[in-house]
Amino acid sequence: MEEIVRKLIALLILVLAFACKNEQAPVAADTVMAQPKPAGEAAATRMIVRTANVKIIVADTAKTVDAVTQSIEAQGGYVAGSHIWRDGELLRATLTLRVPSDKLTSTLAAIRTFAKRVENETISSEDVSQEYVDLESQLRNLEATEAELRELMTDIRKNAKKAQEVLEIHQQITTIRAQIEQIKGRMRYLGQVTSMSSVSLEIAPDFIAQPVVEPGWQPVVIMKDASRALVHVLQSIATTAIWLLIYVAPILGMLSLAAALVWKIIRRQRMATSS
């Protein structure tokens, strides 16, 4: 029993020490970053998040969108999002591209070939190598602590100890397992964003290159549409006239006849009264 209690106390101290280490992680990271690493080690663990923002002017927005999409897919990337809209008579587009990090330079070079001119191009990089190394260290410590707790829980069960002790250790294992999954999720995310670079591409048309007459303008079709509209209006007028003639005219005739009779009766009464 005393040996189990000692193990439990030692594990609790280890968990508390790990929690304190997490709180001091930013300071520790700064300290580690200040110490230079050997060139081989730094290159082996280097993880860079690279993003680019590009704006290009093109002669034809729709064709450029198709060309960029095909070029990106040929390099193992994909279009993560797109927005195409009309600004008056001009077609504009914004694309969010995801490309393998080692293909970012060639991707930007390909995009330039589709442009009449490049309005803006910026590339930013973020080194997350130290964060990844810290996460690996935390993961190893947590997994070691979890293994020891599981071993301790097995010993307690074998010795038929109180269920309360087993429950407390199980709760600690659950907490540590949640931390492990959180760290693994962050490591997976860093692996994804460092393996695939993001490119935000804005495509704008060259106003000078736009045709005087928009493609697809068909004056003959417009004349036919106008003729159909005129015929439709004339048909509506004729329909109204027919309704007035057949439906409204008889009713107005009967009302006029009744009014004439009433007026004649009133007139006779006035003449009789005056005589």
Image (spheres, helix red, strand yellow):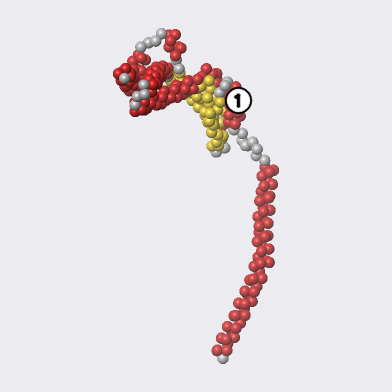
Q: Is residue 188 above or below residue 62?
A: above
Q: Which amino acid lies under the numbered mark 1 shown in the image of this protein? A: Gln
Residue 126 seen in the figure: yes
Q: Which residue is mark 1?
A: 70
Residue at the (66%, 67%) spot, across then down: 247
Q: Residue at x 58, y 26 (%)?
A: 69
> In the displayed structure, would residue 275 be above or below residue 23?
below
Q: Is residue 27 among the parts visible in the rendering?
A: no
- The image shows residue 234 at horizontal and vertical percentages of 67, 56
Q: Is residue 84 left or right of residue 13?
A: right
Q: Quadrant of residue 258?
A: bottom right
Q: Where residue 230 sits: x, y (%)?
A: 67, 52
Mark 1: secondary structure:
helix
- Could you tell me residue 123's position as x and y percent? 47, 21
Name the residue at the front extreme: 160
Q: Nearer the viewer, residue 89 or 184?
A: 184
Quadrant of the drawing holding the N terminus:
top left
Horizontal side of 145 relative to 67 (left or right) equals left
The answer to which of 137 and 10 lies nearer the viewer is 10
Q: Is residue 53 left or right of residue 212?
A: left
Quadrant assignment, res 203: top right
How many numbered dots are placed on residues in this image?
Answer: 1
* Residue in the picture at 59% in, 86% down: 268
Q: Quadrant of residue 37?
A: top left
